Image (cartoon, helix red, strand yellow):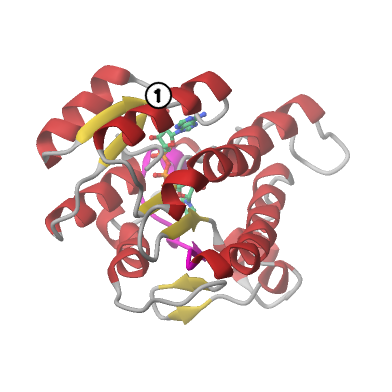
Amino acid sequence: MTGANRGIGAAIAQGLAERGMTVVVGARDAASGERTAQRLGGRAVPLDVTDDGSVRDAVAHVQQWYGRLDILVNNAGIAGGGVGQLAGDVDLAVMRTVFDTNLFGVVRLTEAFLPLLRKADGARVINVSSGTGSLTWQSDPGHAFASTGVALAYPASKAALNMLTVLYAKALAADGIAVNAVAPGATATDFTAALGLSLERTAEQGAAIAVHLATVPAGPTGVFLQDDGPVPW
Ligand SMILES: NC(=O)c1ccc[n+]([C@@H]2O[C@H](COP(=O)([O-])OP(=O)(O)OC[C@H]3O[C@@H](n4cnc5c(N)ncnc54)[C@H](OP(=O)(O)O)[C@@H]3O)[C@@H](O)[C@H]2O)c1
């Protein structure tokens, strides 16, 4: 899984390990990934989702160690900071950086791991999206997300990720691979702290829906879920 060394990703990794799964901790910082893997009894791979070579090496490691991948968790994500994202002042370089991680990173990982996912029996891909990527919620003046006046790049990248989830779910159904998106909810992590948010929700709580989708027997495909059920696209 990606971004497994801290925040919601570390909590997803922990939840999967507690349920008896062998977790491959993908982390940009090799030492931090190793520490997490040691704690969980898993293995670590250096992994930057924006780097083709890094992703290729990670695939080669998983191929060599296990010969297949049962679950791919695309968790790595960035907000892109507070500047260069507001309507009327958009910096395309910022937008490209956000899309490179949050969207193209997921395509890069999914495409690269597809041969190993196809070798598993009923593999699953879980895309960590966001409720801010819901077109329905963003266009509902009564919804909290519609009035936050947030930046363009991040929600747009997550909306595109949602579309990608639907398309991959359809495309990979014949391979028996389930592809779903989750909304962790506003969670206290470095990500939200950097945005100046003070939140109660723990990383474990934010991780719970991804852990559920990863482990529930005969899970769904092509859905967007939060703790209490579907999120409208
Ligand atoms: N927190 C929330 O309220 C919230 C709500 C909705 C959705 N989400 C989503 O949940 C996911 C995790 O967020 P978080 O709150 O746990 O954020 P976080 O604490 O900032 O952690 C982000 C993780 O992503 C990794 N990452 C960033 N860019 C990467 C790259 N290019 N390659 C590989 N890893 C990369 C980071 O690695 P480094 O340690 O190397 O930086 C870190 O492990 C994100 O997709 C985010 O959009 C979060």
Classify 79 as above or below 212: above
The percent position of residue 121, horizontal first and vertical second, equals: 35, 63
Q: Does ligand 1 reach within 8 Å of label 1's beta carbon?
A: yes
Q: Is residue 80 visible?
A: yes
Q: Identify which residue, 205 or 46, lies in the foreground.
A: 46
Q: Secondary structure at mark 1?
A: loop
Q: Which residue is mark 1?
A: 28
Segment tinted magenta in the rendering: 176-193
Dot 1 surroundings within 10 Å: few (below 14), some, or many (20 or more)?
some
**Residue 207 rendering spot, x and y as whole percentages:** 33, 58
Could you say where residue 127 lies in the image, as x and y percent from the top left? Answer: 50, 55
Looking at the picture, tell me which residue is in the foreground, 87 or 183.
183
What is the total number of numbered labels drawn onto the structure image?
1
For the N terminus, the quadrant is top left
Q: Position of residue 157 (x, y in %)?
A: 67, 48
Outermost right residue: 88
Asked if residue 180 lies in the magenta stretch, the reply is: yes
Image side of residue 19 versus residue 216, left or right:
left
The residue drawn where x is 34% and y is 20% is 29
Does 39 sit left or right of 125 as displayed? left
Residue 164 falls left or right of residue 90: left
Q: Quadrant of ligand 1?
A: top left
Camera-side residue: 63 or 71?
63
Please, is residue 211 above or below residue 62 in the view?
A: below
Can residue 51 be seen in the rendering of this structure? Answer: no
Which residue lies at the image location 83% right of the left edge and 44% below the top edge? 87
Q: Relative to the observer, which residue lies in front, 30 or 177? A: 177
